[in-house]
Amino acid sequence: MEDIKDSNAKRFCTRNILVILGFSCVIAVIALIAVGISQNKPLPQNVKYGIVLDAGSSHTSLYIYSWPAEKENDTGIVQQIEECKVAGPGISKYAQKTNEIGAYLTECMERSSEVIPVSQHQETPVYLGATAGMRLLRMESEQLADRVMAAVIRSLSDYPFNFQGATIISGQEEGAYGWITINYLLGNFIQKSNWLSLISEGINDEKTFGALDLGGASTQITFVNENHTVESPDNSLQFRLYGKDYDVYTHSFLCYGKDQALWQKLAKDIQVSSDGILSDPCFHSGYEKIVNVSDLYKTPCTKRFERTLPFDQFKIQGTGNYEQCQQSILELFNTSYCPYSQCAFNGIFLPPLQGSFGAFSAFYFVMDFLNLTSEKVSQEEAIRRIESFCSQSWKVVRTSFPGIKEKYLSEYCFSGTYILSLLLHGYHFTSNSWENIHFMGKIRGANAGWTLGYMLNLTNMIPAEQPFSPPLSHSTYVFLMVLFSLILAASIITALFFFKKPSYFWKEMV
């Protein structure tokens, strides 16, 4: 009788122990899964956005940038996620119709509202930077420039973003921000990291690129002056990015963008005409165009050539000659005096060129059309190709490029010749240093231009936030995973031992 009771007690205890062991296994498995999932689930993205409008002389473009709120050395890791070109001319052309500026900006600002999450609208900063077009308007009439900027501010303030202001940036700032952009995109500011492993791959972090920017109304040259010789303090700027300080040389030549340079050349050349006909070697033979004298003298850039002419209009008749075109362009560069050890032109200090240069904006667009952006194209080959292009008749050129607007197509001969003249005679690149010029349109999907550099510099003023982190520290996570794994293993081993040798277990217990 006692044996029966003892057997029943053993079965009861065994059953309870197995239940406890099974329960322990289930709890251990659930705990392992829970800890693993909670620790390794994707962290929420803590992304910030910013909007920069580039109000240039000929057009306005809007760029949307994003960056993680956790910054690296106080500067955000910024990338371009959207570009929107505003339909119409630059804002300076709205000086007499400022009531239309609101409608002018609507499409791209509405696009921004769609791209950026609604929850981020109120904290997304919006900046507008106006460049050489507005600098010229301000020279012409400060009152008109103020009216345009006031209309822009009213319009942008109506949107649900955090509008930070609209300003006319200086030429030096424009050049320096362009320098920041290309060096950021080339990975020259920070060491290789998970953030920028793709950007910085294969790039030398120790050297920076110089920046060559060409717009419609101005052109900028910017590079690090390794000699640290500052003969002209106005041409020196300092930046702090990713924990490093940079001293750069920069200068903006107002009125020497490709559009204003053309107006200057026409105003200079028409002075010798008595019959209202201008034979122009910078346009293709067979090309003709009527120009109003009032339009010619409308810009401040042509004031030095203004004369009373015996006609209200004149006709351009193209002759298509590269050498004559270049000679006419070189007359715009005054190299007769230099108050420094070395100058570019017009008495502007220019230290010796150093390192590689990225040439973007109109430098790239014009040379890309002329198929001259390849690094294999020598200076001599570039001259030969532009000379050949200029010598073609207007009829042949128009037939060869039917999809390009006549205004742009007709000016490529001048623009190409002007770019070579500016680089070789204005900035003193040689046949050897020509190899250091790299024509850049987009770099890693972002436009080469001043706006990204502007955004990068502004993020220094945006406080960094604490990064989202896993719920457990790494040591705690490892400890819990080991603990629950040991509990699970011990429970399974004990259960197996029970099934295989239960009598041995009770014997040991006795």
Image: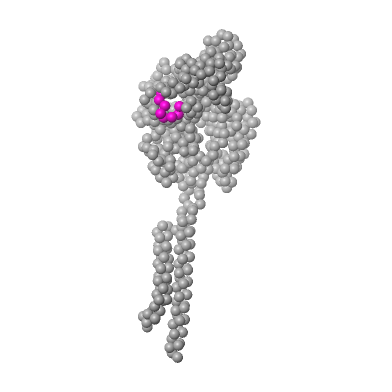
Residue at 47% over, 62% down? 33
Q: Quadrant of residue 125?
A: top right
Query: Residue 352: x percent and y percent?
Result: 37, 25
Residue 375 within the segment the image draws in magenta: yes
Residue at 39% over, 31% down? 356
Vertical position of residue 55 compared to residue 192: above or below: above
Q: Main secondary structure of the magenta part?
A: loop
Residue range corresponding to the magenta coloring: 372-379
Along the line of sight, the residue nearer the viewer: 284 or 430: 284
Q: Quadrant of the N terminus?
A: bottom left
Residue at 60% over, 30% down? 88
Residue at 44% over, 35% down? 182
Q: Quadrant of the C terminus?
A: bottom left
Question: Can I make out residue 240 in this image?
Answer: no
Query: Residue 278: x percent and y percent?
Result: 55, 13
Tell me, what colour scheme is on the image?
one colour
Residue 315 within the segment the image draws in magenta: no
Vertical position of residue 502 compared to residue 171: above or below: below
Vertical position of residue 173 compared to residue 332: above or below: below
Q: Residue furthest bottom?
A: 1
Q: Quadrant of residue 307?
A: top right
158 with respect to 324 (left or right):
right
Question: Can I make out residue 474 in this image?
Answer: yes
Query: Residue 246: x percent and y percent?
Result: 40, 35
Query: Residue 130: x percent and y percent?
Result: 54, 31
114 with respect to 226 (left or right):
right
Q: Quadrant of residue 382?
A: top left
